[in-house]
Amino acid sequence: MWKNIAIALLSCLLAVAVALLAFVVSRLGSSERRHSEAAAAAADRDEAKPELDAPEPPAPEPPHPVVAALEEVFAVIEGNEDFEGAAIGFCLVGPDGEILFERNGRAAQIPASVLKTVTTATALELLGPDFTFETRLGTSEPGEAEPGAAAKPPADLVLLGGGDPTLSPADLASWAQRLAEAGVQSVPGRVVGDGRHFEGSPFPDFWDWGDIGNGYGSPVSGLNLGHNRFTAVFSPGEKVGEAAVLMGTFPEVPGVAWWNETTTAAEDSGDGVVIYGGERAAVMHLRGTVPLGGELEVVGAIPDPERFAAHHLRAALVAAGIQVEGESFGAGELFLAGEPVPAISDEILLHRSAPLLEIVASIHETSDNHETECLFRTLGLRTRIAPDEAVREHWRRRGLELADLRMVDGSGLARANHISPETLARLQRLAAEGPAGEAYVESLLVLEEVGIRFKAGAMSSVRTYTGLVEDGPGRLAFALMANHYPKIAAVRELQGAVFQALRLWGEDGEDEEAAEDEGPEKDSAAEEKEEPQDSDPDESEADAEEGDGAEDAPEDGLPR
């Protein structure tokens, strides 16, 4: 019986457990349904609500019109066959040193004459705007008497250079006249020119052979006269192909024989003469062509500046009525002869050049290589380190590393130089804000109508521009560099478009047509004063297409 009772109880307990389990499952399902229904209802309510827009991020500010215009300009040249193979770089630096726009801004390129701004800006800060070069004239002690001689050699008149690139024949004539008026009647000894203020070769190592005989490549001595240049006058033959005649040179170049191989070319062929010389060359070679139609003047480089200056000082003394017993010599000639170079014991006069700021303004206007190289070498003498290291160290102290600069001369005539547009633009900004800032800015060429101050550079297959944009909310600095381009016309068009864009910094965009007419035209005029370019007989020097030859003399024959 008990067994039956136990079985019944277990059956009841099992039934209760099953019922409880069913109840729990039922409750859970009901809860899930309620949650699902609630979620669906909530979703329905959300869908029924009006949709609210999520806050959008603020729209980016549109670029400044200058930047927008530059983007268009450089977008156009992408894929343009007129720039095929060309290296084009540009950088625009804002008032606070920020990069506003750049294209290949950190790629180093050949700078041509815009490198002069690196030299001039450094010189203004290291030497000061009022710095002057000094040239001295004086007499030496009488020489030691030779054994058995009755008297000592007389004192010499010594012209001692201090690196002045602007000393002129007119200065020598003025000195001679003053001496005559002071009662000087004779010079018993020699006239000696001493240009050892600058050591080493008067020609930078990386200047081309075709440059150093021509006027734009004149030597850099401690003693310079008339930029160490002369003018050769040629007369063409009667017809094309005949020999041209060298009529003479002025001023006279002492100690030089002339090897003339020039021939006659067509009337409109332009100046095709190249002069080959070199350091203390005794023979100068004249090659190329002289056009029909009249005499042609070509500017050449003096091979021995010391001898040249001494020769013309002696001539000036004689012209003033002062008798000179001895001949004229350069210090180099005496060194080669094993003779000592006399030193000044009694100074007669001291000549100071124009202030440095005037020389810098001349460099920026005429792009004179000789003047710039004298400044460059003076930087080395003042700092007692190599000139290029003096430049680097100075700008490093000013906060600018010139890591992409290679500076083998100070003028940019050497093709071995390179610098990037960004570095060049940043240097312009620092120079404008430095201790000689206003002097530097005022010395640059100016397009007044568009508020741009700049320096241009030009040689075969190289065009460069750097400077400042003055008008507008703060000063901008820029550099545009073009190397190895196939068509010069395309580069000029690019330059004009860039200048047109830059003018938008200072105005509301009106009178754009006027800027197009004025900017590039004025710049082309300045460009004519740059480094010589390959000549095209069918075009002016300013509009010449580049060729494959070495840099040629400017067609107008003017010194560069």
Image (spheres, grey):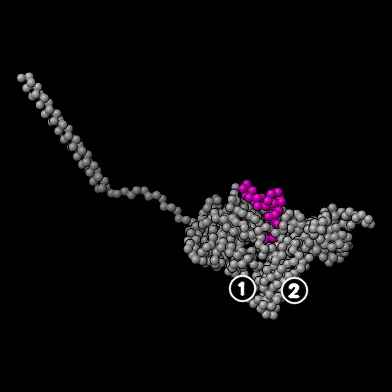
Q: Which structural element holds mark 1?
A: loop
Q: Which mark is residue 537?
A: 1
Amino acid marked by disc 1: Pro
Rendered residue at 50%/61% (across/down):
74
Label 2, on which residue?
Answer: 247
Q: Return the residue nearer the eye: 241 or 216.
A: 241
The quarter of the displayed image where residue 322 is located = bottom right
Rendered residue at 51%/54% (across/down):
100
Rendered residue at 22%/39% (across/down):
35
Q: Which residues are magenta?
A: 369-398
Q: Return the residue nearer the eye: 143 or 541.
A: 143
Q: Does 150 sit left or right of 354 as displayed?
A: right
The quarter of the displayed image where residue 117 is located = bottom right
Q: Which structural element holds mark 2?
A: strand
Q: Quadrant of the N terminus?
A: top left
Q: Does 555 sit left or right of 163 as displayed?
A: left
User: Can the viewer see residue 470?
Assistant: no
